[in-house]
Amino acid sequence: MKGFFITFEGIEGCGKSTQIERLKRHLEQQGHRIDAMREPGGTAISEAIRAILLDPANTAMAPTTELLLYESARAQLVAERIRPALEAGSVVLCDRFCDSTMAYQGGGRGLPMEVLRSLHDIATGSLWPHLSLFIDVPVEMGLKRTRGAGELDRIEMEGTAFHERVREGFITLARTEPNRIVTINGSATPDEVEQEIRGVVEKALNSR
């Protein structure tokens, strides 16, 4: 594929959405063709699945059901948008992807990692990001930002212990795959985070 696939990862309230918009503007100014999207979502079918996944009323959802719904939404997004964009030469920016599954359903829910990786390969045709940016913040900071922003979704409503397990899941992934996953200090100011991300992304794009 001609394009380059970058994902943004981290716990709730880490600042992913803000930094995706900033990087998108910067790369467009540099002349890159950009396709930005989010998970779960990004297509009509995936957004419908997102509504089920994040509905606070769905507290009875089993971990395996949750996993299969996330992978179903991802399969549609990859088929309909991500793979065509990469084949057309775009830089694809995605708010969450495979590493969120490993951290949330693996670290958070305790599902087997080998199962998660196998399902991901089935859902995406073994599509993995070229670069994943893990914006790391302490759980207390992330939850304070999230809970001060308005109504919470089903995942945001989980307790602190769950989000601590998720963060540890991300940290473990970053240690395991340092060539793909770069840890960004999300506790810095938004401008400082943006500059760190720019440096990492420009280096990756120049070396591809």
Image: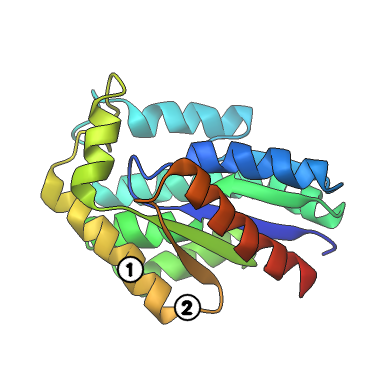
Tell me the residue at 71%/38% (across/down).
Answer: 25
Quarter of the image where one finds residue 127: bottom right
User: Which residue is at the front of the view, 156 or 141?
Assistant: 141
Q: Is residue 128 visible?
A: no
Tell me the residue at 81%/41% (across/down).
Answer: 29
Q: Is residue 139 left or right of residue 44?
A: left
Residue 174 x %, y %: 41, 72
Q: Is residue 141 above or below residue 97?
A: above
Image quadrant occupied by the C terminus = bottom right
Tell me the residue at 31%/56% (across/down).
Answer: 105
User: Which residue is at the front of the view, 56 or 21?
Assistant: 21
Q: Which residue is mark 1?
A: 171
For mark 2, does the 10 Å Cα neighbourhood hold few (<14), some (14 to 19), or many (20 or more) residues? few
Q: Is residue 199 left or right of residue 119?
A: right
Which secondary structure lies at badge 1?
helix
Amino acid type for the residue under numbered disc 2? Glu
Which secondary structure lies at badge 2?
loop
Residue 124 x %, y %: 61, 58
User: Which residue is at the front of the view, 58 or 95?
Assistant: 95
Q: How many marks?
A: 2
Image quadrant occupied by the N terminus = bottom right
Q: Residue furthest top?
A: 150
Question: Real-space Cα distance between discs 1 and 2?
Answer: 10 Å
Q: Which residue is mark 2?
A: 177
